[in-house]
Image (tube, rainbow, N blue to C red):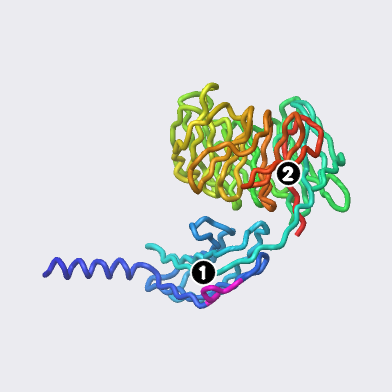
Amino acid sequence: MFILFFGGFACKKDEAEKPELTLSAPVSGQQFKVLDTLLVKGVARDAVGITSIEIQLVDIDGNPCSSRVQEQASDKAVPFSIRLPLDKTWLPSGNYQIEVVARNAAGFTRKWIGISVQEIPRALDAAWVVTGTAQAFQVQRFTNQGLASPVFSGSGKWLSARYYPKEGVWMQASNSTLGQGLVEAFEMKPQWRRLWSRSFPQSIRSARNTDSLLLLGFDNATVVGLRPDGVTGVSTSSLLDGYQTQALISAPFGGVAALAQAAPPYTITGFRIPSGQRLASTTVAQLPRYWINQSANKAYWISGDGNIETLSLFDCNTLLLQPIVELPGISKSAAATNQGDLAVAFSDAIWVYRTNNQVLAPFAALSAATLVRHEVLLGQFWVASPAGIHQVSFPQGAIIGPFAAGANVLDFVFQYNK
């Protein structure tokens, strides 16, 4: 009897250490539109004192869909009214949850409010196609009808670009023929005009785009993030001596810098961007040939020895690598859809790995594809090959085109009107 009573007392004590959290707004099931600002109201109480209130929008799987808003506190009873902007313009329609966390010195209490969000009607304005070699590149603007117009040319090796619609800025990264990194930003309307440029004494090893930053990785284990206005949003230097930046996972609200040793055994350590928080370390036999985002927390990893390649799924938080399937050949390019499916181009056809049934099967009979990209709004793949540029509908697999002559296509960047 004494043991049972003591156990019940201990349980009540643990519960008492957590804050009490009451939420009053918004109401469950309330509807919002992208670009609305939510007002989250409630009261947090604790006998010792509340230290902070945090709110964030998450999807039904718990993945973050907004920046985390935090307010500090130092009182036993904290009424709060916190604004949460739905400023991620790409957010699709669907059901979401507002995650609210109240913290004290000993622990926290977490609650959720279910809401629905309606996306912004969008239209694909143009596809910006980058062609060139290791010494020079050209940027052309293609309309949906396949009409092309030259826009910009540069020297050096192309790396990455993105159009930021909120700022109306195109930001691109490249390496010069002398091995120096270069980031340039251009205003696209009413005309193409350079806004600013930033040069680096060493070459950029990896460049990834997030919703608000262009993340750059260098061989000295340094990660730099630049905003469209040219301000440095992230700068983490010398995270690990003797490591190189192998790859960058670009999550919509930051990312993970995966730093790998330059020689086997390949020990990889993950760091949260922009906080620099160290996540975990793991050792792998082979570094990936391709690293493709599958979600905010996971990425597809394609690796091989030149004869056999394997498709795996890499967890960006735990750094666990889970093999999925052996590929039917040596891949040329790969791209993930916004539903998490993966298209892989081989010498004779494009195959697709479907996450719903975990099957890899032939998808489109396009041979000698050199580049595959997925366009989010229309849900189609854009494919470059010596025969020209094609559009492939998904999931039907219908091939449209070619609507441009064959060229050495380096990148597709999609621009939307809202």
Quarter location, residue 265: top left
Q: x and y percent of residue 168 in the render? A: 78, 53
**Vertical placement of residue 120 versus 382, above or below:** below
Give percent across and percent down for residue 180: 72, 30
Is residue 214 visible to us here? Answer: no
Q: Residue at x 50, y 60 (%)?
A: 60
Q: Is residue 129 above or below residue 65?
A: above
Instruction: Tell me: residue 1, above or below residue 325.
Output: below
> In the rendering, at what x and y percent does residue 308 appear?
51, 25
Disc marking residue 413: 2
Viewer-closest of 202 and 397: 397
Q: Amino acid at mark 1?
A: Gly
- Residue drawn at (51%, 74%), measured in percent from left and top? 28
**Residue at the image point whose x is 49% and y is 27% from the top:** 286
Residue placed furthest toward the left: 1
Q: Quadrant of the C terminus?
A: bottom right
The secondary element bearing badge 1 is classed as strand
Pick the residue in front: 7 or 76. Answer: 7
Asked whether residue 193 is drawn in magenta, I would say no
Task: Check residue 27 for magenta coloring.
Answer: yes
> What residue type is disc 2 on?
Val
**Quadrant of image for the N terminus:** bottom left
- Along the polypeptide, which appears first: circle 1 or circle 2? 1
Task: Give the structural element (helix, strand or loop) at label 2.
Answer: strand
Circle 1 is placed at which residue position? 114
Q: Position of residue 297 (x, y in %)?
A: 52, 48
Q: Which segment did they paint magenta?
A: 25-31
**Whole-number angstrom distance, CA of label 1 to CA of label 2:** 34 Å
Asked whether 238 or 338 is in front, the reply is 338
